[in-house]
Amino acid sequence: DAGVIQSPRHEVTEMGQEVTLRCKPISGHDYLFWYRQTMMRGLELLIYFNNNVPIDDSGMPEDRFSAKMPNASFSTLKIQPSEPRDSAVYFCASSQLNTGELFFGEGSRLTVL
Amino acid sequence: DQQVKQNSPSLSVQEGRISILNCDYTNSMFDYFLWYKKYPAEGPTFLISISSIKDKNEDGRFTVFLNKSAKHLSLHIVPSQPGDSAVYFCAARERTGKLIFGQGTTLQVKP
């Protein structure tokens, strides 16, 4: 079975532009997580879903960030408008029955100029 | 406020010696603790875990110790190998299912 698939792998954009990151979780997994990796805070949880329903979005830094999961096989994380401080690697992860053993994608490296 | 902390950003050890990575947490309600390993340009991968009702779990060269009274856990790698060089993240799970990670420790194992 394919792992968690994220796109794009790299994104370079200018301040003020909209950014959309995409994730396809592992089939059969009912939890999906979005994390952001920074040097200062490590892996920071932004939001997670259970059965496509957002459970905890307290980690979403600002209203500029939004996430959706329209179905069990797809999720998006959108930043609008983007700012240079949003530059980071964004990871999507999925798990089954929330065992804690998350399977991560390869990440999307975002650079906002 | 960081509920899970890895206070050592980096660690360097000689091949064949023991590597000890440390992690502290503040929330006594965490029910599960995990360690993840991350290579550059890849996502983190699960390494080993321990339930809050246990104090030790061993898997080959990797052992995780949990000291609940001190709210501290550690990962021991014996013997360390150059291929173990990576970033190691400690994570703790809340009963709600939320998984909180530390900042990571970069381990370098020198040949």
Image: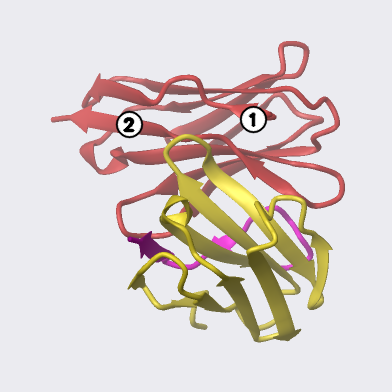
Chain colours: A yellow, B red
Magenta-colored stretch includes residue B24: no
Q: Which residues are magenta?
A: A96-113
Residue extending farthest to the front is: A16
Which residue is at 39% across, 26% downward? Answer: B9
The picture places residue A78, in percent across and down from the top left corner, at 59, 73
Quarter of the figure with the C terminus of chain B:
top left
Position of residue B93 relative to residue B43, above or below, is above
The picture places residue B60, in percent across and down from the top left corner, at 46, 39
The residue wearing badge 1 is: B4
Front-most of A112 and A7? A112
Quarter of the figure with the N terminus of chain B:
top right
- Please tell me in which quadrant of the rendered image residue B41 appears: bottom left
The residue wearing badge 2 is: B107
Front-most of A82 and B21? A82
B34 horizontally vs B30: left or right: left
Which residue is at 72% across, 80% downward? Answer: A69
Q: Tell me which amino acid carries mark 2.
A: Leu
Judge depth for marks 2 and 1 and give the one in front.
Answer: 1
* Label 2 in the same subunit as label 1: yes
C-beta proximity under 8 Å, tags 2 and 1? no
Residue extending farthest to the top is: B70
- Please tell me in which quadrant of the rendered image residue B32 appears: top right
The picture places residue A111, in percent across and down from the top left corner, at 35, 61
Write down the chain letter for disc 1. Answer: B
Q: In this rendering, does residue A95 appear at all? A: no
Q: Secondary structure at mark 2?
A: strand
Write down the chain letter for disc 2. Answer: B
Q: Tell me which amino acid carries mark 1.
A: Val
- Please tell me in which quadrant of the rendered image residue B50 appears: top right
Which residue is at 40% across, 78% downward? Answer: A8
